[in-house]
Amino acid sequence: MKTMNRVPWVLLSLCILAVLAGGLLSGADDRGNEGAPHRAVNEAGMEIKNVPSPAAPVSGDVPEGGKNDEKGLRKEEKSPPPGPYVSIVIDDFGFSRSIADEYKDISLSLTWSIIPFQTHSAYAAELAEESGIPYMVHMPMSAVGDKKWSEKKGVIDTGMSAETVTLILRKAMASLPGAMGMNNHRGSRATKDEKIMEMVMTELAATSLFFLDSRTISSSVAYNTALEKGVPAAFCSVFLDHESSEEFMEKHFRRGLAIAEKKGWVVMIAHTRSATVDFLKKKSGIPLEKGRYVTMPELIRYTAKK
């Protein structure tokens, strides 16, 4: 009888052990299945079921036309601010430290253009970078009436080979590594030569630089060739300071504003001259009635063809 009485208890114990074993095996399956809902536990130690699994890491690649904000989310590119856009470029930095110091204090959105390999080219570039002023390579090119230039002079001229043009350009760009663009210094002969301009723009197309056609001659093909080669480009419409009088500069400044109002943008070129500094300092305290001052990189970005 005693043996018979033990049987129900033995059977009951076996059933309890089976239930406990099944629960342990079930838990092991949940942990091993990555596709199952992620399980979380609250502060009281109770299981919270059906909490979604953490998202997979997001790739650092951003769809074209957008960018990531500081939280890693995609943000659409902002539309350009309303124009018209007025961009003033100052040519011929590299010869004088003092004039660079004077221009640094002008509050207008200016762009400097620095001739490579001059006595104070490196100083001007360093000062521009420290001051947050964008600058370009002011690339020497041959003018009508010049004698033929040799490769050693660093001037791009007609009749040069592609290898020579490429070498001159690369040396100039390497000397001013922070440059964001390039424009021609002089160049009335070189910029109307299609073959030479194709060589120049082919090299620039392999960089991130834009090109500004200074338009020192009306028959220049530099701007159109740049666009054909896929180089972002613009061209100068007004030279502000061929004469140093305030009256002359004011007249041409007004002409530039009229062009900007008509076509949406204008580039005006001035030079590293004390009279021009004085003129632009006065302008810096007077907001434009229509439009806004922009740097060359901004102009290129705002007017880029989609």
Image (cartoon, rainbow, N blue to C red):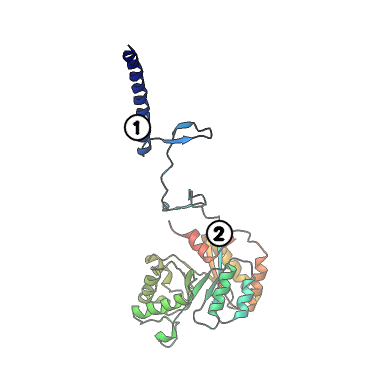
Instruction: Check whether the beta carbons of the residues at disc 2 and disc 1 lie within 8 A of each other.
Output: no
Q: Where is residue 40 in the image (x, y as percent from the top left)?
A: 46, 36
Camera-nearest residue between 19 and 268: 19
Q: Which of 106 and 246 is in front in this view?
A: 106
Residue bearing mark 1 = 25
Front-most of residues 120 and 114 = 120
**Residues packed near mark 2 inside 10 Å, few (<14), some (14 to 19) or many (20 plus):** many
Q: In this view, does 37 lie above or below 13?
A: below
Secondary structure category for the residue under label 1: helix
Disc 2 residue type? Answer: Pro
Q: Residue 300: where, in percent of width, then height?
A: 48, 63
Left or right side of 232 for 90:
right
Quarter-of-image position of residue 16: top left
Considering depth in this image, is 148 or 46 the residue closer to the camera? 46
Q: Is residue 153 visible?
A: yes
At label 1, the amino acid type is Leu
Inspect this view and state whether residue 149 appears: no
Determine whether the residue tagged by mark 2 lies in a helix, strand or loop: loop
In the rendered structure, the answer to whether residue 239 lies left or right of residue 150 reads right
- In the image, residue 165 lies at what x, y percent? 38, 78
